[in-house]
Image (spheres, coloured by chain):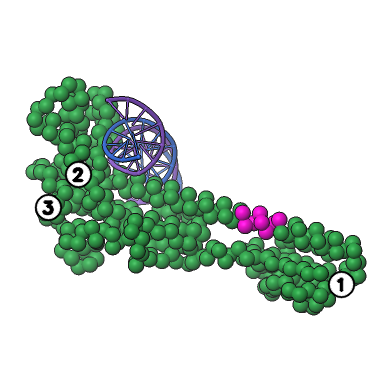
Chain colours: A green, B blue, C purple
Amino acid sequence: MELALSLGEAPKSFTLLDNTPKLPNNKDPVGFCIALGAAASSAGKSSEEERRGSSDPPVQLDLLPSTPVLRSQHPSSHLRIPWLNDALGLERVTSEAPAARALDVNSFPVAPAAGEDGDDGAALSSPNSAVSSFQMDFCLRNGNGGNGGDGAAAMMRNRRDVEGGEGNDRGTSDDDENGSTRKKLRLSKEQSAFLEESFKEHTTLNPKQKLALAKQLNLRPRQVEVWFQNRRARTKLKQTEVDCEYLKRCCDTLTEENRRLQKELQELRALKTSQPFYMQLPATTLTMCPSCERVATNTAANNNDASQIASALSLSNKPRILPFPNTQAHPPPAQKAHQ
DNA sequence: ACTGGTACGACTATTACGTCA
DNA sequence: GTTGACGTAATAGTCGTACCA
């Protein structure tokens, strides 16, 4: 008869790493990667998360875009992250610096009244593609196009975009009072890529960074702020999905383990009834460490080596022995398989 | 040192818009 | 042209923290 105790093989499939590698040479064309790791302190982790002591999941999803993607999209290195410039010794993009010019996509005229700390000037941003609703509104506004109520609403929206500084972002807005709806602006690919690159460096922005980024991208600081908020939310959502998947796999593994142990228990009970001779051996206790989930086999009577038990039981496969000499580090037995 | 008010930033849930099949 | 799904910008509400009187 053969008995096999094989507890604790789970960690094989879930390699835990202390630090999730950034995978700088990621060849993923999409620019995203999923890394398995404990990630006690990832570089991109915000201080907020650290302060809250969020339990680090065993699987960490790295949703940051790989740098080469952006670099390849912008070989001319037009896009520069202001705070990165400092770190890299590059020229700092000042408020008067032609940041907007650096980004060709945002060739929109910047309001000359753009203040240092305000976002009014940058409000004339946007971007983007020919389908930019803002551009359409802008055309309507400039051309005094009165195509019905929609055009008027667009004008109101434009006024909000132009006049709406950061101070108006909180509290009641003109839109609410006038009953018009907000207009959603689509960021251009270049803007999104640049924001992604920035997010890669900092998942949160301080006011200076936000302003610099907004100036560089010709966006309102509020837009940059919102983008980072949504980006963090998306990252968290993806991470949650990965965590869920990991927990599901853990559950499956444990279920399978439980099933196998139940089966073994039945076999042992059957052995006990059929061959009572073996029960004269010292009682064996299975001890499981709750932290690392490894199992040690000890005899309750005289701490016989498990190999002796195995030989006495004529086991062809020795049970996995993982002794825990330090009872402090490994609390009392969590399982008693049989006596 | 403690307390209440305020400002601010981050997070979350939700809404609304743009795009695409 | 219409519609539904989906992605995402934007909004509103809440909470925690820092600062100040």
Taking the spot 78% from the left edge, 60% from the top edge, the residue there is: A265
x%, y% of residue A250?
A: 59, 56
> Is C11 drawn above or below residue A111 in the view shown?
above
How far apart marks 3 and 1 lie (CA) works out to 85 Å
Q: Which amino acid is tagged 3?
A: Arg
Local secondary structure at mark 3: helix
Question: In the rendered view, does A8 fall on the left or right side of A241?
Answer: right
Q: Residues within 10 Å of mark 2 (few under 14, many from 20)?
A: many
Q: Please identify the quadrant where the N terminus of chain A is shown.
A: bottom right
Question: In the rendered view, does C6 fall on the left or right side of A72?
Answer: right
Q: Residues within 10 Å of mark 3 (few under 14, many from 20)?
A: some
Local secondary structure at mark 1: loop
Q: Which residue is mark 2?
A: A128
Please tell me which residue lies in front, B6 or A139: A139
Local secondary structure at mark 2: loop
Taking the spot 82% from the left edge, 73% from the top edge, the residue there is: A313
Q: Chain of mark 2?
A: A
Q: Earlier in the sequence, mark 3 or mark 1?
A: 3
How far apart marks 2 and 1 lie (CA) works out to 80 Å
Q: Chain of mark 1?
A: A
How far apart marks 2 and 3 lie (CA) works out to 14 Å
To the question of a shared chain for discs 2 and 1, the answer is yes
In this rendering, the label closer to the viewer, 2 or 1: 2
Residue A163 magenta-drawn? no
Magenta residue span: A252-259
Q: Which amino acid is tagged 2?
A: Asn
Taking the spot 25% from the left edge, 54% from the top edge, the residue there is: A194
To the question of a shared chain for discs 3 and 1, the answer is yes
Q: Earlier in the sequence, mark 2 or mark 1?
A: 2
Q: Quadrant of residue A76?
A: bottom left
> Is A325 drawn above or below residue A161 in the view shown?
below
Which numbered marker is on residue A101? 3
